[in-house]
Image: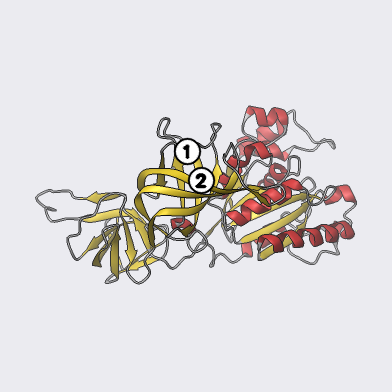
């Protein structure tokens, strides 16, 4: 049974948490103690029904203010598929939280209030979806009950969003009219909108094709640990442990180790005590090579037929996540998979107004700013372009003083 990872985005009060709560409630995915707490809660909807948003509003501040601040992860499954949901905040001041929650998703649900239509935050959320290369987008026009389940309202919003989707090059967009509060078109198709001929949200999520999601054929495995037991039984044992980021490694594949450039052949693949014929993306394995190659943590094993780029100058999109502004005069750490090295932001190319999508010249980055920069690293990184391979095309910036993540990078080009 495969897993679909998706996140929800929308303006404050568009109903993100309620929609997720409805999915969990109507699929019987709530534990008995959670259901009891839900029923005894003082938070009710205007019609006296249970406020399902409580299921994801975990922080006290979220419950008090009725908004999402942190990223809440929920898990459920049906007979057809398992799901991991990230409920991300919609408010502009929590943009960094949204980027964090969306970074590992392969489908986005964007909520639009049927009463308000496409607003600035819809543009911002859609831009982030485009920036992160998320393949599938579901636009849920929510609160249809508050506009009398009017088909004209629904159609008007679709026409406006299609213009935005074309501008952002969002190719796979599905539109579903819903009422998260009432449950219309969430799990079952609604009788209140007999003009809608599509699937309910859950049925779509169960059937959406995941074969093309993050399935890069570029074989990449960053080395996490060189395994050398050096015991009497295993005195010649030398394996390289790591998680396959993308692609597949097969026995007898010719591979290259970067940054050294040394080549060898895959001789053995181990998963615990089991010998495998192949290692696929997502598997944590130990790879043995036919030759004794000098390999350390931070090196990357790749298929020799499709080498990544290697350079110390990289053009990248940056989402700044620190309360202190970006300082182009100081050194930061950059972590690209298991490799950590020093770097500087040598140039700010532009900053994006994510409410209008306009690009502006800038000399600083502050909290939640997004734009394009040139990164200069102390050691060359072996990377793929983000659009070609999300798993090997991103990195994080780390403050050398606090060791905290302060920025997310998506690699767009190698600078000659």
**Position of residue 117 in the picture relative to residue 106 (left or right):** right
**Position of residue 196 in the picture relative to residue 339 (left or right):** right
**Position of residue 280 in the picture relative to residue 71 (left or right):** left
Mark number for residue 278?
A: none
Callouts 2 and 1 close, C-beta under 8 Å? yes
Tell which of 66 and 132 is nearer to you.
132
Q: Position of residue 128 (x, y in %)?
A: 62, 51
Is residue 105 something one can see in this rendering? yes
Q: Position of residue 114 (x, y in %)?
A: 83, 50
Which of the image's four quarters has the C terminus? bottom left
Residue 323 higher or lower than 12, as above or below: above
Dot 2 falls on a residue whose secondary structure is: strand
Name the image quarter holding residue 282.
bottom left
Dot 1 falls on a residue whose secondary structure is: strand
Q: Residue at x 45, y 37 (%)?
A: 329
**Position of residue 162 in the picture relative to residue 80 (left or right):** right
Mark number for residue 405?
A: 1
Mark number for residue 408?
A: 2
Is residue 28 something one can see in this rendering? no
């Amino acid at each position: 049974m495969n897993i679909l990872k998706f996140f929800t985005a929308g303006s404050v009060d568009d109903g993100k948490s309620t929609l997720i709560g409805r999915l969990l409630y109507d699929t019987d995915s709530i534990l008995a103690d959670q259901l009891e707490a839900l029923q005894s809660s003082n938070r009710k909807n205007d019609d006296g029904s249970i406020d399902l948003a409580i299921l994801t509003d975990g922080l006290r501040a979220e419950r008090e203010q009725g908004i999402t601040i942190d990223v809440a992860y929920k898990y459920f499954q049906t007979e057809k598929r398992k799901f991991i949901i990230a409920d991300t905040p919609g408010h502009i001041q929590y943009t960094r939280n949204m980027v964090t929650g969306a970074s590992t998703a392969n489908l986005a649900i964007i909520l639009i209030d049927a009463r308000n239509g496409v607003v600035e935050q819809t543009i911002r959320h859609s831009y982030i979806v485009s920036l992160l290369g998320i393949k599938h987008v579901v636009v849920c026009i929510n609160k249809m009950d508050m506009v009398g389940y009017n088909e004209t309202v629904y159609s008007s919003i679709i026409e406006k969003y299609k213009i935005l989707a074309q501008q952002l090059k969002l190719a796979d967009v599905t539109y579903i009219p819903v009422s998260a509060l009432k449950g219309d078109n969430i799990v079952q198709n609604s009788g209140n909108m007999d003009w809608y001929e599509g699937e309910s949200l859950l049925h779509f999520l169960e059937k959406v094709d995941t074969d093309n999601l993050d399935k890069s054929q570029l074989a990449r495995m960053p080395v996490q640990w060189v395994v050398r037991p050096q015991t009497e039984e295993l005195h010649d044992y030398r394996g390289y442990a790591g998680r396959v980021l993308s692609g597949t490694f097969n026995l007898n594949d010719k591979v290259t180790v970067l940054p050294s450039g040394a080549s060898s052949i895959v001789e053995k693949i181990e998963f615990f005590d089991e010998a495998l014929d192949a290692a696929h993306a997502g598997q944590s394995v130990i790879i043995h090579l036919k030759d004794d190659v000098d390999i350390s943590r931070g090196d990357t094993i790749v298929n020799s037929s499709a080498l990544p780029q290697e350079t110390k100058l990289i053009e990248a999109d940056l989402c700044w996540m620190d309360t202190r502004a970006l300082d182009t005069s100081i050194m930061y750490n950059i972590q690209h998979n298991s490799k950590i090295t020093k770097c500087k932001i040598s140039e700010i190319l532009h900053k994006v107004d994510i409410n209008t999508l306009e690009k502006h010249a800038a000399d600083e980055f502050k909290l939640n700013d997004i734009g394009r920069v040139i990164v200069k690293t102390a050691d060359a990184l072996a990377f793929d372009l983000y659009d070609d391979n999300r798993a090997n095309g991103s990195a994080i910036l780390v403050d050398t003083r606090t060791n905290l993540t302060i920025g997310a990078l998506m690699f767009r080009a190698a600078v000659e």
